[in-house]
Image (tube, rainbow, N blue to C red):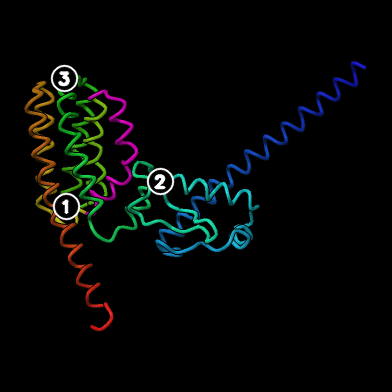
Amino acid sequence: MTEHLANGTATSSSRRADADLATANRAVLADQLAERLLDEIVAGVYPPDTRLPPEPVLAERAGVSRLTLREAIKDLRQRGVLRVQQGRGTFVNPPTVWAPFDSTVLNARVSLEQGYELAHELTELRRIVERGIAELAAVRRTAADLARMEDAVRTMREAWERKDLDTFSSADVDFHDALLRAAGNTFALTLFHSIDGALRTVRRRTVEENAELAERAIAYHTKIMAAVRRRARKAAGVLMDQHLQETEDFTASLAAASAAHRERVGRAAAPGR
């Protein structure tokens, strides 16, 4: 009897293990499918406000079960990328309503953006938060924090001399990341890490548009680092505010110009013209 119960328990445990493995595999497939659908949306296969193909078609095309497909769609719904209209199907939402702090979705949204509205919004957020970050960094910084800032500024200078815009832009963001780490606020660090990829893309685009502003960034970073080094809290905050105000003004002008261009194109393409 004992042996029978032991065998029965082993069989039951084996079945549970198989079920858990199947669930895990389905979750992995659902994640992969969600990423694939997002890539297709970004590529324009499914533009905003268009309806996705029916479930059976999508599932067969992806080579997954309908259950796995539903999990992938649920994931993208939670991120604001898709919406389900009862009786009509699943539709793609405009990027403006996608989850703002989901790094994967935000990176996809940046790659979709034709203008600079998102770049301007991100710069506004940075200016609001990073003045305080610079002030905290001046109080809490360590020698290791200063070393990271120095390395970022040095890399910016060297990259700018070579006109290596990718490295320059990345080092620019690295400097601000070093300040974040020096500030020691985990909530601010988490917030900015969720938009890190988007910031790097945006910075790369703005560097291409304004070389003077890029050069001034090196000068500002040097001054901010000096203020942080001497623990001059107020000066570090003021310098950061001035630095990001210049960037904010520039991205605002780019956003306005791109919006005006789209409006002109829309009017020209309107019926009757």
Q: Amino acid at mark 3?
A: Val
Query: Can residue 198 be found in the magenta stretch?
Result: yes
Q: Residue at x 36, y 49 (%)?
A: 107
Which one is earlier in the sequence, the residue at label 1 or at label 3?
A: 3
Seen from the viewer's position, the closer of residues 30 and 273 is 273
Query: Can residue 271 be found in the magenta stretch?
Result: no
Give SS at disc 1: helix
Per the image, the residue denoted by label 2 is 104
Residue 46: give x, y in percent of width and height: 45, 63
Placement of 71 over or under 88, stated as above or below: above
Placement of 31 over or under 142, stated as above or below: below
Within the image, what quadrant is residue 264 found in? bottom left
Of the two numbered discs 3 and 2 in the rendering, the one whose residue sits closer to the viewer: 2
Give SS at disc 3: helix
Residue 268's tag is: none
Q: Is residue 205 left or right of residue 75?
A: left
Q: Residue at x 20, y 62 (%)?
A: 259
Which one is earlier in the sequence, the residue at label 3 or at label 2?
A: 2
Within the image, what quadrant is residue 257 found in? bottom left
Residue 251's tag is: 1
Placement of 141 over or under 87, stated as above or below: above
Of the two numbered discs 1 and 3 in the rendering, the one whose residue sits closer to the viewer: 1
Seen from the viewer's position, the closer of residues 250 and 81 is 81
Q: Which residue in the rendered view is the most extreme toward the right? A: 1
Q: Residue at x 20, y 31 (%)?
A: 149
Per the image, the residue denoted by label 3 is 139
Stretch of the chain drawn in magenta: 183-205
